[in-house]
Image (cartoon, coloured by chain):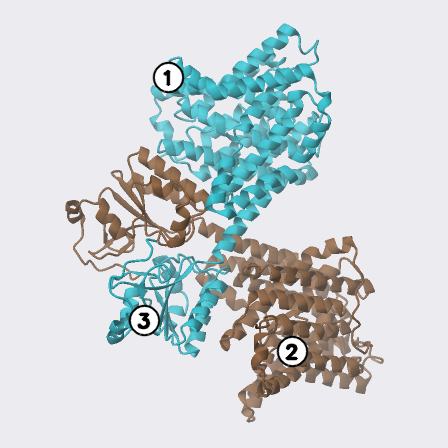
Chain colours: A cyan, B brown
């Protein structure tokens, strides 16, 4: 018997893959060290909490997740959401603040695990791409604005983008010059390396891939240079530049204080939102990488993997984690073949935490702010709203509502608005289905929309096709349109509904069809069905409808016209020359 | 120029219709008098408020509504919702209570008018039939339980069904015997007349229609008999039977006190829910009656008509009104031809209020409770959940959740749950679309599901049909299924997606298709589209996709196979004898 709870990749693991995973693990560690410190700061937490969240969670995901290349750990958006959830409940820097952040991870982990066990991976599908893009863009702007405080050493305050901007502007005179110089030059260096380094290295003869990976590791170089500058110029003690400060060395202790009911209630909604949004982003990153290698992502396994990662983070003193975009891309590019790469990164993070934390104690906060700003500016995505504007206004509006919502009302309200917009748009669209009156194309067996094609119709016979599943929200529109067409063609004796595009008929709709059948019959019109899909027919058999119809559902409209139109009238009916060319190719 | 704001039926109004409307108006008045008193009591309001809500609203609806036969006024469910919204905010019987009920009507009226002006009639479609049925059934049980208090004279208390039942049971010993005797015998009389009277009258030689109308007027007879009994036996003064008490005679004064912001906020959500649920019920009643005569209901006009009716109710001292089921059926059966029947009923209600209120002062509350109980028991609908159980479990669950939600959590939470269930079910279903691998039926030009039909397929050519519009929530499932099929048929060179059932592709889906195209090409597989609907193609033209495809979208799968399969291989490919009969007719 196959042991099913062991990951499938383990069976074919070999030395070659191990070597590739080792390289990727080291590369990811170099990226992860500054990121873990920075995102902890963004979440309002002590820097070592970020490192705690970058060890056990990676191992937990490796065991349960389904992606070969996803790099789990602290990420920008989840860190921002953590700050916005915890800040109103506890003082920044207090032990309670850290506890509440752990609690967020714990609750989120439980929710994800439960959803995973219930196989509810489909909930991720409630977020459309424009909503995610609008949300990430709004969050990125909000994060960047917030990081201007440590970057410039300006003592600004504010929750929403507007408050932050006003506060930054009015306190601009109070900026701390040495901090601002360090911060802005770090931004410049990071931006330049992101923009030009890979190209430069390639021109210098380096391989494509190595150049790109090396360029992505620039943050570590900037961090080390900044530390060197602080040490050499005593910028922290003499010039008052804020630095990370002492980091407790050693591995996190596995411990957890029981939360109160009040804390649980206050954090429940944010925890679910952080978990779900993290899950959605994570799955989309994992999927886009998997598809490049023909691998597959299992959303339910992702729920379990990320759930376990968050539980592990909570138990080891961390905060909410998920799959990071930039890090996963680096992991993929560095050649990671299996989740073992993540385990290796976790081991090296442990080594750093055991022995090298002293190195980062004099790292300026302004440099961490710079790495965050440069990272999130890359998340800003105006291309999506531009495409949406041309392709589908409703999607563009969903993007705008979400992005503006995040900036003006905060992350939770913004994403709530966006989801409501997406679902609302979908329902609105489904409630106004495309309905075509169809006719025969030339003398073929094909029937097409009479508005787009030159088709022949038959007196007394109304052929209609509904291009949408029939359900409670669109049945009124369908009935209205049928009534309209019957009024237009007063001599109608037979109405044939082509259900080729109908993949489901809910109870409300089937009852409406039964009433329609009875009402039409009273008015001397017979209702017929044609091209009923198999699964739909299976369900209709459970109702009276098929037995009440004058004729069993026709295989297609050709069969329907053959049966319902007398042969003589079929010939007379054609008002058009045969083989009339179509007016449109659609 | 045609004056468009005059109702269209006015042009063809004649003496014959006027005579029919007069009869229907009188019949409706006889039904409306006890109903208006009873539903005011159900809403916790003085009885005359019910009469106020039965005059001007009828006139307002007659001017703006689109139904020829809908009878607007107080109804059971809206009255229950009014009580549950206002009771926590003001003492029963206080002037403030009456004011807040008026405010509910005002707010609801404004919301309906706004939705009507914005042509948002489609919001009614968010409530599926199982949700409405579950809601009405749960409400009916809740109302009936609540009315056992005045019916039996038991001083019970409670908001939810459970609380009420427990309280009634524990205080059962305190019942007031004369009240209970009056109440129970009224229930018996009403039930018997509802059950047997029409049949008896028919057997006695009365016409079908007259018998039915007369039987429906039994409440008025019971009311008059009960008043006679109270007067004759002095049941109110001597036996302590609770009666209606003094009703201020005269027409309502058109007046309104300005509400405070706090009151507005507390009532906003209930007002919207009462208005929307009333609207949905009303439209479904109006539609089912209109369809019997080939008339049509305009949901936007209904919004305006009901909005105006509620404003009129608020301005004349009433409470939320909507179209009533039982009353509209009587109006229809009594021969109402136009909304003039409603105006006539309003005039007669005015006459009653001017001169006959004294008659109802000694009407026992137990009898009103009896009319309510018998009326709402008729609303209980287990047939829908039984049908749903056989036809579509998800619909049955939605019914149960809504009904149990109303009973256990109250009307608002119940309907909220039900709507969430309906939309959730729909999204869940749409996120798991039916996807078929198709092949050629015999040597025809038709392509069907290879699992249901004996079809021929072609090596290297994968033909798939998605039976649902492509949008953010179902694209992951579509991509997953495509990957699965490609893995199963390793030698695939061409993937043709038949989009005949796809009536919309949102931005998320079109981006996913573009990525799919790029990824497949890297793996040596070409993506093709076939049978793209006109409106879908119009949109796709706005994207890069059609230009990136190796071949322009095929008109149908027959054309696609002709183009993609070399003629020789087409003949070799068929593994089946020609004209193989289909395995299923679906």
Please, which residue is most extreme toward the bottom here?
B205
In the rendered image, the quadrant that contains the N terminus of chain B is bottom right
Label number found at residue B546 = none
Helix, strand or loop status at disc 2? helix
Q: In the rendered view, tell whether residue A80 sits above or below residue B364.
A: above
Q: In the rendered view, tell whether residue B67 sits above or below residue B566.
A: below
Residue A75 placement: quadrant: top right
Helix, strand or loop status at disc 1? loop
Label number found at residue A207 = 1
Q: Which residue is mark 3?
A: A458
Residue A559 drawn at (x, y percent): 28, 66
Question: Callout 3: few (<14), some (14-19), or many (20+) C-alpha neighbours within 10 Å?
Answer: many
Say which residue appears at 73% left-offset and 54% top-offset: B266
> Could you tell me which chain the residue with mark 2 belongs to?
B
Please, which residue is most extreme toward the right here?
B237
Tell me how far mark 1 sits from mark 2, CA to CA.
Answer: 85 Å
């Amino acid at each position: 018997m196959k042991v099913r709870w062991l990951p499938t990749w383990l069976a074919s693991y070999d030395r070659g893959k191990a070597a590739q995973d080792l390289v990727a693990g080291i590369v990811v560690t170099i990226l992860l060290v500054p990121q873990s410190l920075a995102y902890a700061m963004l979440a309002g937490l002590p820097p070592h909490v970020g490192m705690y969240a970058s060890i056990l969670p990676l191992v937990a995901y490796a065991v349960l997740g389904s992606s070969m290349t996803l790099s789990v750990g602290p990420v920008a958006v989840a860190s921002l959401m953590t700050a916005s959830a915890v800040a109103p409940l506890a003082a920044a820097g207090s032990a309670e603040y850290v506890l509440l952040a752990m609690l967020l991870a714990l609750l989120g982990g439980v929710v994800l695990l439960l959803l995973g066990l219930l196989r509810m991976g489909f909930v991720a599908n409630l977020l459309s791409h424009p909503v995610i893009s609008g949300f990430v863009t709004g969050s990125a702007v909000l994060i960047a604005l917030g990081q201007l405080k440590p970057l410039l050493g300006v003592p600004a305050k504010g929750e929403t983008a507007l408050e932050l901007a006003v506060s930054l502007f009015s306190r601009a005179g109070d900026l701390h010059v040495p901090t601002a110089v360090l911060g802005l030059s770090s931004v410049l260096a990071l931006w330049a390396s992101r923009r030009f380094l890979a190209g430069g290295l390639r021109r210098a003869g380096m391989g494509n891939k190595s150049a790109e990976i090396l360029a992505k590791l620039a943050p570590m170089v900037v961090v080390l240079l900044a530390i060197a500058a602080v040490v050499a110029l005593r910028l922290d003690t003499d010039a008052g530049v804020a630095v990370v400060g002492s980091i407790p060395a050693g591995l996190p202790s596995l411990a957890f204080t029981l939360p109160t009911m009040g804390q649980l209630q206050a954090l429940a909604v944010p925890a679910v939102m952080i978990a779900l949004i993290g899950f959605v982003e994570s799955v989309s990153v994992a999927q886009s990488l998997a598809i490049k290698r023909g691998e597959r992502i299992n959303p339910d396994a992702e729920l379990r993997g990320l759930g376990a990662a968050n539980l592990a983070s909570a138990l080891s003193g961390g905060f909410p984690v998920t799959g990071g975009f930039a890090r996963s891309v680096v992991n993929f590019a560095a050649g990671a073949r299996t989740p073992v790469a993540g385990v290796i990164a976790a081991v090296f993070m442990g080594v750093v935490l055991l022995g090298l934390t002293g190195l980062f104690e004099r790292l300026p906060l302004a440099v961490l702010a710079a790495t965050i700003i440069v990272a999130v500016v890359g998340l800003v995505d105006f291309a999506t709203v531009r495409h949406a504007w041309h392709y589908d206004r409703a999607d563009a509006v969903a993007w705008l509502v979400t992005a503006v919502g995040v900036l003006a009302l905060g992350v939770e309200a913004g994403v709530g608005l966006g989801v409501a917009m997406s679902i609302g748009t979908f329902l609105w669209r489904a409630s106004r289905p495309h309905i075509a009156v169809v006719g025969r194309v030339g003398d073929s067996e094909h029937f097409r929309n009479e508005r787009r094609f030159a088709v022949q119709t038959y007196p007394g016979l109304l052929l209609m096709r509904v291009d949408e599943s029939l359900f409670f929200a669109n049945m009124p529109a369908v009935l209205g349109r049928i009534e309209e067409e019957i009024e237009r063609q007063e001599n109608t004796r037979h109405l044939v509904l082509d259900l080729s595009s109908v993949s489901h008929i809910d109870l409300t709709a089937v009852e409406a069809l039964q009433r329609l059948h009875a009402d039409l019959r009273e008015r001397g019109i017979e209702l017929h069905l044609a091209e009923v899909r198999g699964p739909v027919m299976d369900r209709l058999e459970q109702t009276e409808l098929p037995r009440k119809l004058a004729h069993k559902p026709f295989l297609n409209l050709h069969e329907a016209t053959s049966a319902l139109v007398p042969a003589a009238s079929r010939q007379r009916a054609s008002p058009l020359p045969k083989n009339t060319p179509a007016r449109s190719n659609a």
